[in-house]
Image (cartoon, rainbow, N blue to C red):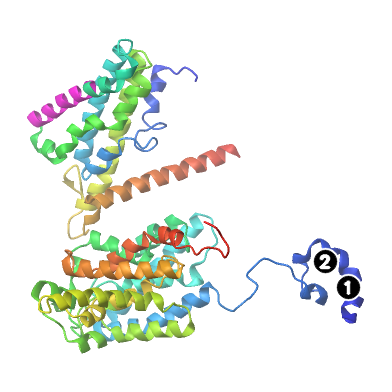
Amino acid sequence: MAKRTITEEFKKGLWAENAVLRLLLGMCPALAVTNSAINGLVMGLASTFVVVCSSTMVSTIRRLVPRQVRIPTYIVIIAGFVTLADLFLKAQFPAISKALGPYVPLIVVNCMIMSRAEFFASKHPLKPSMADALGTGLGFTGVLVVLGSIREILGFGSIFDIVIMTEEAFTPWVIMILPPGAFLSLGLMIGIINHFTELRKKRSGI
Amino acid sequence: MDDTQKKDPPQKTAGESKPAQSGPASPAAERFIVSSSPHLLTEENIPKIMYSVIYALLPTVLVSVYFYGLRALVLVLVCVVSCVATEYLIQRFRERTVTVFDGSAIITGMLLALTLPPGFPLKGAFLGSVFAMAVGKHFFGGLGYNIFNPALLGRAFLQATYPVLITTWAEPFSGPAGVDAVSAATPLALMKFEGQVVPHLNLFFGNVAGSLGETSALAILIGGLYLRYLGYINWRLPLGYLASMVFFSYLFWLYDPLSYADPLFHILAGGAMLGAWFMVTDYVTTPVTPMGQWIFVICAGLLAVIIRLFGGLPEGVMYSILLMNATVPLLNKWTKPRVFGEVS
């Protein structure tokens, strides 16, 4: 594999190797908490914080961890940062913390974070690991905000709690704030993106 | 014989090398066509069957227009036009052959409209039609590839999208359905939430509140029997479904006739008739083997009765069919008859 610069490591997580749209990792929070844009944003930022911190730490201690116990080690590290994020949200943004419910503690088992630790941070030095984690986290946040916005616009007629369509002009689609709405919109997003990626590949191939 | 041999020599080499392609140009080649099955050609094709289903649905549409006024007709037309338009656009976009005139999109539109309340907003009907066609049919690959009945999927989507609007029913003959129509509960809702039983004759002729196609069991029966007469539907599916519903509701009725409705009420009320004759009999989303069809209809009937009696919603036909649709690939696989002489 060709060696990539730090900028490239950062950029790949945003689109080309986007955790949700491309690798289909971290689907649980992406589906569960995106019934409004603000929930998506907070969940994305909390996950970004956790992935950056845990990747930094995993990369720092990568030579000290015996191979046999690496997964438990990563989980303990991730759980530590998740507890930090959870307590911070509870103290500073109790309303949003309540809305996110159990999904903040569940960041511990987000495969996106685990994949960064296992596939990247444990094999790369500090700087590329941080860039990679930051790119992945921000890419994840972006998808969650877009998905949350789509569902909030169609399900409540508002975005970031700002009303853009009144009840009279637009009957909200209740389905969009229910789980099926998450599956439908995420599936459509991935399908459309795959379609255009294929199309571009075909065009550039010819 | 002599005649053939006389004409044969000039054609012989061509005929030997490509027997299947020799056209009707020579009578000899016509007599010795070698081709793969099917060997029997009939006049049946997709458009012919589909248009027969459309004719079979017409009595139901007419009855709904009689009971609910022209608004019902508008609803049907909006659904049909938006289904056809969606199919056309998707097929153009995907660069496939445009098959909007084979009638299947029209049927989906009609069936979807028949599952909606007469005063349902036209915007919502349009949305449901687009969903039924795009997600229910073309995302799976188009006609013949869809797992779920597209019309029912559209209806399920609308049920989750507009839970209030889709359960706002109008009394028959209460004027142009819409804002000023008298709202009423469907027979199933009356049964479930208030313990009232609507007379069977009203259910049979259709003088009840409900979706367009929930009203008259008689009109649906006429259409269904017409399709059976043409041989396009199999008696096993509709009758098996209804019999299964009768059987399971009979058990509950025997147990407690006061709190559970009688079996006849169950098959006459709600979407049971429409579901049995037009949705369970869908070629694409039901099993192909007789054994599979039996399992399908018995389980679907049981599910419908259970949802009606114990579920949160008064009507269970839609979910019973959709749930069983999901099992069809497995049923087809498990009930595949063994080839003669095959050793397992």
Q: Relative to B249, is A46 above or below?
A: above
Given the image, on which type of amino acid does mark 2 rest? Gly
- For disc 1, the chain is B
The image position of residue A36, as x and y in percent, is 20, 44
At 37% from the left and 62% from the top, the residue drawn is B325
Between the C-alphas of marks 2 and 1, the distance is: 9 Å
Which of the 4 image quadrants contains residue B318?
bottom left
Residue reaching furthest to the top: A64
| Of A50 and B192, the residue lying toward us | B192
Magenta residues, start to end: A77-92
- For disc 2, the chain is B
Residue annotated with mark 2: B15
The image position of residue A174, as x and y in percent, is 21, 56
**Disc 2 to disc 1: CB gap under 8 Å:** yes
Q: Relative to B16, is A109 above or below?
A: above
Q: Is residue B103 magenta?
A: no
Q: Relative to B113, is A111 above or below?
A: above
Give left or right: position of B307 versus B281. Answer: left
Q: Earlier in the sequence, mark 2 or mark 1?
A: 1
Give left or right: position of A122 versus B234. Answer: left
**Residue A45 seen:** no
The 10 Å Cα crowd at callout 1, few under 14, some 14 to 19, many 20 or more, is some
Which of the 4 image quadrants contains residue B197?
bottom left
Residue annotated with mark 1: B8
At 12% from the left and 79% from the top, the residue drawn is B257
Element type where label 1 sits in the image: loop
| Of B281 and B98, the residue lying toward us | B281
At 35% from the left and 76% from the top, the residue drawn is B240
